[in-house]
Image (spheres, helix red, strand yellow):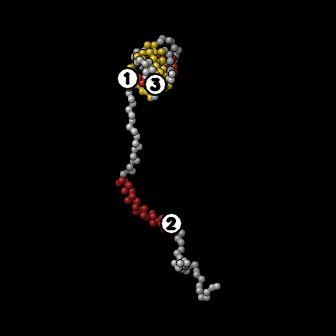
Amino acid sequence: MPVIGAQAPSPTSDRHTADGEPHRPRRTRSRLLRRSVPMLAACLALAAPTLVTASAAAGPAPLPPAPIRPAPVPPVVPDDPYTLLADRTYSSVAVIGGSIPGGGPLVVAFDETPRVGMDAGCNSHAGSVTASGDQLRIGRLASTMMACPPPRADADDWLARFTSVPLTWRVFGPILTLSSPLQTVVLIEEQS
């Protein structure tokens, strides 16, 4: 029942909570954003020159530390490098800087003594070999004298030119590379 003489609260009149505290209307997000965004932009505008100057004065960001890696282990080189080749036979799989006439392959067989047998697709060749450091010197080669059809007929001349200079050699597991100033032959060890 309504109290006589009391007025009903109007939407614009002061309201109080149950504790007697004055009721404060909630501010909506859009209202807060409308007030906060311009204030934030003004702060950034004032601070931006200081931030840019400070970052330029500091220089580039420091690099992360390099990963720790073990020191490389030097390859074990025997007193006589020929021991790495002795009693092994290799067959070519690629020629960089040219090709073997007739397609090869170049087969290189190292004896237990410092001798080598070679075949590039026509005649068989044999001779002495000297390994010194990374240089391999093939001595004068003796060969069979078969006549081969072209283009295999030119394989013997190619082999003579290839072995006429000291060859740089490298062994990587079953792979042997022989390099002249103009060509590199990649060979794979044949399994017996």
Q: Residue at x 55, y 78 (%)?
A: 18
* Disc 2 from disc 3: Cα separation: 74 Å
Which class describes the residues within 10 Å of circle 1: few (<14), some (14-19), or many (20+)?
Answer: few
Q: Looking at numbered disc 2 in the image, what kind of residue is underneath it?
A: Leu
Image disc number at residue 33: 2
Which class describes the residues within 10 Å of circle 3: few (<14), some (14-19), or many (20+)?
Answer: many
Q: Which comes sooner in the sequence, label 3 or label 1?
A: 1
Q: Which residue is mark 3?
A: 185
Dot 2: element: helix
* Residue at the right extreme, as displayed: 1
Q: Looking at numbered disc 1 in the image, what kind of residue is underneath it?
A: Asp
Q: Residue 188 location in percent, x, y?
A: 48, 25
- As rendered, which of 114 and 138 lies closer to the eye? 114
* Disc 3 from disc 1: Cα separation: 23 Å
Q: Residue at x 50, y 18 (%)?
A: 121
* Disc 2 from disc 1: Cα separation: 83 Å
- As rendered, which of 34 and 138 lies closer to the eye? 138
Q: Is residue 39 above or below residue 101?
A: below
Q: Quadrant of the N terminus?
A: bottom right
Depth check, mark 3 against mark 1: the one in front is 1
Dot 3: element: strand
Q: Which residue is mark 1?
A: 80
Is residue 182 visible in the rendered image? The answer is no
* Residue at the bottom extreme, as displayed: 4
Dot 1: element: loop
Q: Residue 96 location in percent, x, y?
A: 46, 26
Q: Residue 16 location in percent, x, y?
A: 54, 79
Which class describes the residues within 10 Å of circle 2: few (<14), some (14-19), or many (20+)?
Answer: few
Q: Which comes sooner in the sequence, label 2 or label 3?
A: 2
Q: Pointer 2 and pointer 1: residues touching (CB < 8 Å)?
A: no
